Image: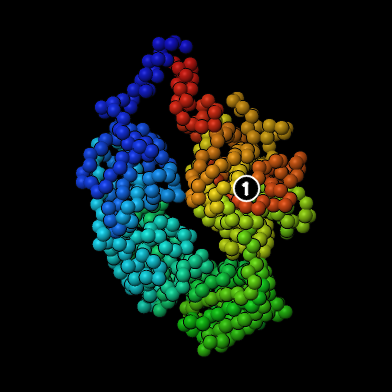
Amino acid sequence: MNGYKFIWVLALLLGISQVGNGVTPANNGYQNAQAIGNVTSLAFDTTEATFDGPGECISNTNRNIWYCYTATCTGCVTISLCGSSFDTKLAVYDGCSSTPTLSNNLRCNDDFCSQQSEVKLTATAGNTYLIEVGGFGTSWGEGSLTISCDNAAGPPSNDTWSGAISIGNVSDLAFDTGCATFDGPGICITSSNLWFCYTPENSCNITVSTAGSSFDTILAIYNGCNTSPTLGNLINCNDDGPDSRQAEVSIPAIAGNKYLIEVGGYNADTGPGLISVNCGSVIPGDLSNNNCNNAKPIGDVAGLAFDTGNATFDGPGHCMTGPNIWYIYTATCTGNAIVSLCGSSYDTKLAVYDGGGCNPSLSRLIECNDDGCGTQSEAVFEVIAGQQYLIEVGGFSDNTGQGLISVSCEGSAPIDESDLGDAPDSTNNFSNNMTAYPKGGPSGVKAHYPTVFNDPSSSAPYGPIHFNPLAVAHLGKKVTNENEADVGSDQDVTNNIKPQTDSPDNDNGDDAVIFPLSMPQCRWTTFDYIVNVINPGTNLWVNIWCDWNRDGDWDDDSITEQALVCSNGIVSEWTVKNLYLINLPAGLNQLTTPAFLSWHPDKGTEEIWMRITLSEKPWTGGSAPGLRGNGGSGPQAGYDIGETEDYYFIPNTSFLICEDYNGDGVINLQDLAAFTSEWLENCP
């Protein structure tokens, strides 16, 4: 290789960023944040800055500088980059003495005043706030910073759900989450939010929209305004509706019923916005559960709307013979369950059967009720936690109409605070083979992923169960608990896998891995994921398995006959091996995996099954070494803490220049040098 040529190309590469005055700003790193108070049009220049920080709001491909603001009042603080000469981004973190992370990020904004940024937040006099100033994409340059504090302004009156503003149909009702705080269950929205209580005058399909808002919004709707919002009364949630970054939700609503509307922003985004609520045509009726074979799965629900107006009749005719619809209820406790149609608009009838199968015999009929509350129906019956019960809803004679169904259970709560995966497993409690590829069949590659913890054979390999996922740390923002992967009670109603119908991938709590994932053939790569730490100080390990050869297991590695070979190394399906996480702070931590080699077959399915497990102990070979399906298994005694998440997705397998060229486990400037050397050696 020509040495002069190498020096010339390297100088060219390094010289690409040599613009500006050549002086690095004094506040280039967050540890060197410039102390400030209220300022007006304070000049700055990010041209010669470098990047440091969490890379959550402002990308690590950009350049950023830092300020430490001490609040001059208790009130609403406005931080603005309006008037800057480039496309800016702005983030604010709680406190200047700790490392900025995703968990202490208070605000993030891209475009507020054209392509410039502005945020508002409620501050306490004397407290410090770390301000990160950067740009969108690869934009940097000169700008101005203005900060002011208004001690007369505070959170809006509808800052909490109990203070929700009552509204009817509205068009472009203005709101501003800038100085709002967070209040609520944190299921759909985890940033600053506001609340509205909507009551429709007519039964109709309502549409709630934030189109025209200045920031990236999220909407959630709950049933009822007088009780705290929970997962149990969440009706719908939306991030990006038809209008790009603004949200839109449509639901059927019953006249006079109250609906709690939560408005917030994606990530930590805030700003002024517009909300519109429109009551459209009369509910046409959701007839997806008109036939018993399509019975809608439910758990405990409150005021779930339905309409039998266009329904037809099917069933045994033991209790009713008119138009009907069907539900399958999975009992959430052992005790007495109450099914009620009180509040419906017509003369109803109600039947409950033991078990979930259709065409129930008379011997399965538990309850038949006509008039339990006026001309509406209600039934009380004994249930066993985790068992299913078929509910038939219809009307007296041929009566039909709009109604509400509520189900509650009084007894001992059965759902253990445990978590399992949701990859297909042919060693299940139903002894049914499940399909790995394609997911859900028809016949294809048989699944040998260890997911079920306690199958009929009671033998290894054991699916990884985590008995206390919320005690110390878990993956992503949420966990949905279940007793077992394929039977028993499940917090999100549907079992993680349903072997009877070859249906895996049903866990609604899989939210740790940040997509899309780039996994180029025989190239070193990484991806990001989130660990939520509740109680710091415990040793944590992460393990990841990928079914590279798509054979329905995670067993293939360098010591098997099925070793996957690349020119630059052996590829193991045990992709990330016992990554030790130390001293993670409380809250959401965005982490990057060590670099690993990817592998894909020349033809066949593009989808891949991947498992990520967070636990309190390293993986030491699984519960059944040498047996098929051992890869990704858990210990016989289970894990005490953590969580397992399974993903079925199509990775990006195209070649990417951003990879770990020198194989040291990270992607940085050393890889640029390695790539440059390879290019000089091999390119003409």
Q: In this rendered view, identify the residue nearer to me: 538 or 390.
A: 538
Q: How far across and down, in percent of the image, does residue 666 sit?
A: 51, 32
Above-or-below relation of 55 to 317: above
Amino acid beneath label 1: Ser
Q: How far across and down, in percent of the image, does residue 598 sit?
A: 57, 34
Circle 1 is placed at which residue position? 615
Q: Residue at x 61, y 27 (%)?
A: 569
Dot 1: few (<14), some (14–19), or many (≥20) neighbours within 10 Å?
Answer: many
Q: Residue at x 74, y 43 (%)?
A: 628
Q: Count of labels shown?
A: 1
Residue 111 in view of the camera: no
Residue 163 in view of the camera: yes
Q: In this rendered view, identify the residue nearer to me: 86 or 299.
A: 86
Q: Is 147 positioned to the left or the right of 657 in the image? A: left
Residue at the far front in the pictured view: 126
Q: Residue at x 58, y 71 (%)?
A: 327
